[in-house]
Image: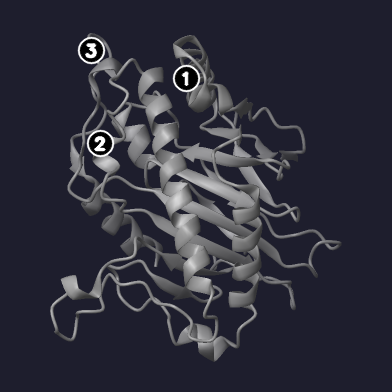
Amino acid sequence: MTTTLTPIPLIDFEPFSQGNVADREAIARQIHQAYHEIGFMYLKHPGIEPDLIERLFARSKQFFDLPFAAKQAIAWSDEVSNRGYIGVERERLDPNKPGDLKEAFNVGKELDPASFPAEPQASLGMNQWPAELPEFRATVLEFFDACADAALTVLEAMAIALQAPPDFFVAPHRQQSHTLRLLHYPPLAKTPKPEQVRAGVHSDYGSITLLFQDDVGGLEVKTRQGEWISAPAIPGTLIVNTGDLMERWTNHEFRSTQHRVRTPTEDQAGRSRYSVAFFCHPDDEAEIACIESCQGGDRPALYPPISAGAYLLEKLRATY
């Protein structure tokens, strides 16, 4: 069952980034409640300029409008880098369902080519860029940097919410092992396969995700009661949700919640849907072990320690 009513809280982040100690602690408490109850929040004033978001969406549309051959020329072709183009139905977020009705383009932190050896595998881990769009790279990288900065501030608030040092989550994210993903859900030209949706039921893999979406809609979030609720775009906000590694890190104090993008209704079937997800991931070598404030006494750690990089690779192999 799906309802249009949403209990996902909307939090104005400006008092945290610009306020005093009491303001910061108050916002941290709001974030704690949101992530403990549902794992999602709408964030207002995240520190990312609206003009940059608009420019990024325009560049995204230009990219997905390219001929398939041009996109496929920079396709993600290995299991490690997680960079490049992913065609429609290649990804299956719900492994028990048909491939997702979306295409994507993944970007990571821009690396210096001089740091790679002159070997056949030298391009592994490097971003790939469409030659047809000369201004695309600069806008995407500017957006990546803005999201990385905003994510660190949110992570600082989350640490304060758990009575940990403010840099507890910030420190193991210094290498920016993040993924920026541009997403396009094409109009439905034919009837989907049975149980096929735009994005299958899943939870995110990393620490937090910053999500930007257009007004087409379709995102749904699963509550503790097992009900699917709509999470439409709210002007002037983005969605920030917690991922699997954060759930492990906090011993389920913060929830990693299942979500999906449903197949559009008839009146929306002829429209494209665009969204942008910034998957914030700890440094590959970071050990994800239950933090002290989330365990003790009759609350033992639920998971053994694991490196963030090993966990991500395990998830990607299963998804693709």
Mark 2 secondary-structure assignment: helix
Q: Please tell me whether residue 261 is drawn above or below residue 76 in the rendered image.
A: above
Q: Position of residue 253 (x, y in %)?
A: 39, 23
Question: Could you tell me how far apart the alpha carbons at marks 3 and 1 are, in whole angstroms?
Answer: 22 Å
Distance of label 3 from label 2 (alpha carbons):
24 Å
Q: Residue 171 carries which label?
A: 2
The one nearer the camera, 225 or 50, is 50
Q: Which amino acid does label 1 sit on?
A: Ala
- Amino acid type, label 2: Ala
**Of residues 96 and 212, which is closer to you in this image?**
212
Number of callouts: 3
Quadrant of the image containing the N terminus: top right
Name the residue carrying label 3. Answer: 296
N-terminal of the two: label 1 or label 2? 1
Residue ID at (59%, 62%): 56
The residue under the point 57% across, 27% down is 14
Q: Is residue 296 above or below residue 262?
A: above
Residue occupied by mark 1: 28
Above or below residue 67? Residue 264 is above
Label 2 Cα neighbours within 10 Å, binned few <14 / some 14-19 / many ≥20:
some
